[in-house]
Image: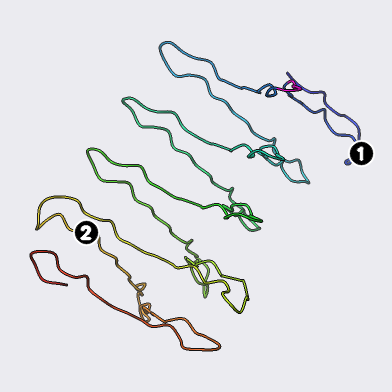
Amino acid sequence: VTAGAAFGSNAVTDIGGDLIFTAGSATNAAGGAVMVTSGYSASTSSGDVAVATASAGAVGNSGEMILTTGKTTVGSSGSASINTGVATQGNSGGAYVTTGDSFYGLTGSIELTTGKATTGDAGDIKLTVGQGDTNNGGDVVTTAGPTTAAGKVGGQVAINGGAGTSTDATDGGDGGDVVVTAGAAFGGNAVTDIGGDVKINGGAATNAYGGAVEVMSGFSAATSSGAISLTTANAGAVGVSG
């Protein structure tokens, strides 16, 4: 199925034809679905599904890729899911979100944003690694970008709790916590099955000073600043506290 080409010379109005796929509407029940499925193979790989916008010409931008679920009045709006298939004996497929390289401008950003809530709670953003059965659990690695430019600084990794923006004098908004917790250990060996560590390291340097580790409590414009507490946990039935 190929839409018609446009040979007009006007760069604004002489556009190529569209391909529009629309399922049927319904008066009372659900509307029809749009399903695109690649071909099955009884002996080898199934077919691919490729969705791509064409490259731009000499002047202009390449087309956008937009995936949007519909609005609702009473019910919940639809979810947008990207899932790879279950693998019985091989590896399951990866899910990748990557912006393109840029030779003279900025590379594109990747933004994960939940919607604003008017009367309820805003949605969460969760990054969760799957459970390992015969080997280690997977890692979560967050790394800011390096730079090769002289006199410039590598990217920051910033983790900020949400602001409580209510200025109500009786009970206004509280700032959100930033909680870093190492993994618990449920093994029965009292020597080797230890809980995970929390490690904070300043950056190394080849010639100048290494990076500092700074811990500072919060400032208050009206009352006391926050406390800093360093405490080891109580010991169990047998043992000493740390």
* Mark 1 crowdedness (10 Å alpha carbons): few <14, some 14-19, many ≥20: few
Residue 7 included in the magenta stretch of the image = no
**Residue range of the region highlighted in magenta in the rendering:** 24-28
Residue type for callout 2: Gly
Q: Nearer the viewer, residue 183 or 97?
A: 183
Whether residue 55 sits left or right of residue 131 in the image: it is right
Residue 106 location (% of width, % of height): 63, 58
Q: Residue at x 43, y 83 (%)?
A: 226
- Mark identifier at residue 83: none
Q: Quadrant of the C terminus?
A: bottom left
Q: Nearer the viewer, residue 223 or 5?
A: 223
Mark 2 or mark 1: whose residue is earlier in sequence: 1
Helix, strand or loop at mark 2: loop
Q: Quadrant of the N terminus?
A: top right
Residue located farthest toward the top when viewing the structure as drawn: 42
Whether residue 181 sits left or right of residue 99 in the image: it is left
Q: Distance of mark 2 from mark 1, alpha carbons?
A: 68 Å
Above or below for 181 versus 133? below
- Mark identifier at residue 195: 2
Above or below for 83 versus 235? above
- Residue 57, image quadrant: top right
* Residue of label 1: 10
Residue 195 location (% of width, % of height): 21, 59
- Residue 178, image quadrant: bottom left
Residue type for callout 1: Asn
Residue 126 location (% of width, % of height): 46, 50
Q: Residue at x 71, y 42 (%)?
A: 62
Q: Residue at x 64, y 56 (%)?
A: 119
Magenta part mainly helix, strand or loop? loop
Above or below for 180 versus 36? below
